[in-house]
Amino acid sequence: MAEKIGRYEIIKTIGQGAMGLVYKAKDPMIDRIVAIKTIRQDSNLFARDAEEVKGRFRREAQVAGKLSHPGIVTIYDVGEEGGLFYIVMEYVEGETLDRIIDAKRLPDLDKSIDLMLQVCDAIGYAHKNGIIHRDIKPANVMIVDKKLVKVMDFGIARIASSDMTQTGKVIGTPNYMSPEQVMGVKVDHRTDIFSLGVALYELLTGEKAFPGESITTVIYRILHEDPISPRKLKLQLPSSLDYIVNKAISKDIEKRYQNVEEFTKDLKNYRNPASLPAGMDSAAQKASKKAEPEAEDTLSMSGANPPSPPSTPLYPPLLRGELKGGKKGLESELSAKKKPSSPNMGYLLIGLLILIVVVGGGLVFFKKGQRSAREEKKVESPLPEAKAPEKTQVAEPVKAVEAAKTPEPVSERYGAININARPRSEIFLNGKSYGQTPNTISNLTVGEHEIILKNNDFPPWKETVKVEENELTKISHNFVPKKEKGFGSLMINSKPWGVVYLNGREIGATPITIPKVPEGRHKIKVVREGFKELEMDIRVEPKKKNTLSLKLEKK
């Protein structure tokens, strides 16, 4: 007879999470296939005030159970048996969005937007019914028949979130949490909008918006850093999606979308940027907006009837709007510039006077030169010592002038790198992540740059590349496969059920099957409250099914 949880007959284990396992089961009373999510009483969720948490859990499950929406997995039942808390919900055949992203099988752009719109529709429905999800992430979005969305895990997210703020612990990976949620302050429905934006970022790019190898790093980035814009990771994305994502994941909650309807409206119009708000303006549009007051000044200049401007502007301060006094100041400045140009006859007389002075001065200088030459002939021998000071006196001022010249600033020069690798790998350029291969990175300063390619199945590859001015440098690398290691499966069962630890790491409750365990020796430990702890060493044989049946003894 199959093992049971409550009245439900367990068919098989279909997943595991931070708090327990998920089973496919059958409700014999109505002959319905269901999914059962278990939560162990010894998990962090029940770390303190267990009875209060249980009551809160039941109330929240009851509220979530009232949700009836085609995009939300329905909750049927909630119960407790032998220290094991469980939720019975609709069983859905499909694939979670995180697995699709991890396998690099991203849908095309229109399909991605359609899936996200379905998620928004489900979350918007929940918000209208007063329920905040608090744990939106790709792992909680099931894709059915490659086109329909089912949002999961309503009912436990609020309890998990409440307990986190009390114990100071983060349940699960916080990559999708809002800044206010990470800080443990009171949250509202806008925390879900932040999580939706982060999930959209990952669906569009295949990369996490706030990556990190530790929870501390992830939290720091959520609170203090902005992610790389989606278009830098995928150049083919429209600029409107940069705007939509950035608005959804704004750290300032007041600058975020204020409800799911606003977010949905912009998503539907992502191919029509003109329909988006003014914040969508490009840099060029912003520059033209700043120039609008200057255009008014230019119009006022034309009203003052200035002379036709030459090809090179005579008055750069006017064009830059640097004169004080507004339009009147501009007109007076122009009229001041015009006055000297009117008396043409005066210019002619001044020119003749300058010519007379120059000619007269030249004649005087010529006569003095002749007189000096005659006097020099009377001298018996020239003094060579007198010439040295003349050279020194002439040379030193020239050098001083040359030294005083300010060198012209050298503008920075740029190039680009195209990086490819087989299989696909993560790119690190000068220690900073630049998404995955293939990728082209532009606006790099000329000179040497360090590239590191990382793939979990191979050793990292490191290379120093020289970037040339206005040139695209191409880099390609084929990883050498690691030596293949043997694996075997391990199935562990116990009576009664217990929590299993493999090499010191908790992996779930019995019965449990681990499909891929490295060959060799491993430590197994099975524990349950009220029973003696069972610990042993086992050897896993490659390409074999290793079975372990255990019996726990009461203390």
Image (spheres, grey):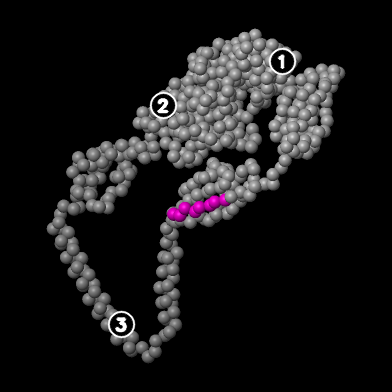
Give SS at disc 1: strand
Per the rendered image, the range of residues in magenta is: 470-477
Q: Amino acid at mark 3?
A: Ser
Q: Is residue 488 left or right of residue 90?
A: right
The foreground one among 110 and 83 is: 110
Q: Is residue 105 above or below residue 148?
A: below
Residue 136 place in picture, x, y as percent: 56, 24
Residue that extends furthest to the right in the rendered view of this protein = 555
Q: Amino acid at mark 1?
A: Lys
Residue that extends furthest to the left in the rendered view of this protein = 345
Residue 257 place in picture, x, y as percent: 46, 25
Give SS at disc 3: helix
The foreground one among 227 and 107 is: 107
Residue 22 inside the magenta-drawn segment:
no
**Disc 2 designates what residue?**
268
Q: Quadrant of residue 448?
A: bottom right
- Marks 3/1: CA–CA distance: 126 Å
Position of the N terminus by quadrant? top right
Tell me, yes or no, if residue 529 can be seen here.
no
**Disc 3 designates what residue?**
372
Choose mark 2 or mark 3, whichever is in front.
2
Magenta segment main secondary structure: strand
- Residue sitting at x 43%, y 84%: 384
Do the residues under discs 1 and 2 have CB atoms within 8 angstroms? no
Q: Is residue 34 left or right of residue 530?
A: left
Q: Quadrant of residue 357?
A: bottom left
Disc number at residue 4? 1
Q: Amino acid at mark 2?
A: Lys
Residue 416 place in picture, x, y as percent: 48, 51
